[in-house]
């Protein structure tokens, strides 16, 4: 006994390919069940293939992200070394500046002290 297909969604249309849009009788129930099972099996196979491809794509993505992270770490390490060198140079220059100002200040103080005690 034929059944009528009343749904208009694409999912039902893909499960029952003989149905058209509108109320059109489709094949007998047992044929529709057999067709839907085979269609479901093919859809499950397609979904499993898509899942495998997504899994491979995710693995490739995380490998690429790992490679990018390693490259960025190398760049930041080089920048950190440069900043360390610049910091060391600035500390050395600051010490020289403080030392030379102290020496000049001492020299000026000595000269003023000498000048104070001379008639």
Image (cartoon, helix red, strand yellow):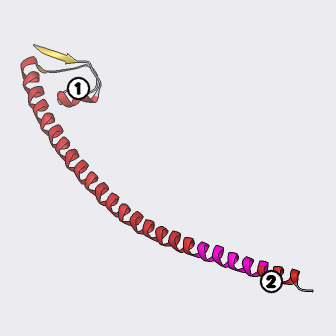
Q: Nearer the viewer, residue 106 or 92?
A: 106
Residue found at the far top of this picture: 1
**Left or right, 118 with reference to 17:** right
**Left or right, 24 with reference to 89:** left
Residue 78 is situated, as x and y percent measured from the top left of the image, at: 41, 69
* Local secondary structure at mark 2: helix
Read off the residue under disc 1: 12
**Residues rendered magenta in the picture:** 93-109
Report which quarter residue 55 is drawn in. top left
Report which quarter residue 14 is drawn in. top left
Read off the residue under disc 2: 111
Decide: is 74 above or below 19.
below
Q: Main secondary structure of the magenta part?
A: helix
**Left or right, 15 with reference to 74:** left
Q: Residue at x 31, y 55 (%)?
A: 65
Q: Nearer the viewer, mark 2 or mark 1?
A: 2
Decide: is 63 above or below 19.
below
């Amino acid at each position: 006994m034929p059944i009528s297909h009343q749904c208009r969604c694409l999912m039902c249309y893909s499960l029952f390919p003989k149905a058209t849009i509108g109320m059109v009788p489709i094949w007998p129930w047992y044929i529709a069940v057999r067709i839907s099972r085979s269609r479901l099996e093919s859809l499950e196979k397609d979904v499993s293939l898509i899942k495998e491809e997504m899994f491979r794509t995710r693995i490739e993505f995380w490998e690429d992200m790992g490679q990018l992270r390693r490259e960025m770490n190398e760049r930041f390490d080089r920048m950190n070394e440069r900043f360390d060198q610049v910091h060391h140079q600035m500390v050395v220059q600051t010490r020289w500046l403080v030392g030379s100002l102290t020496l000049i200040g001492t020299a000026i103080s000595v000269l003023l002290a000498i000048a104070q005690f001379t008639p």
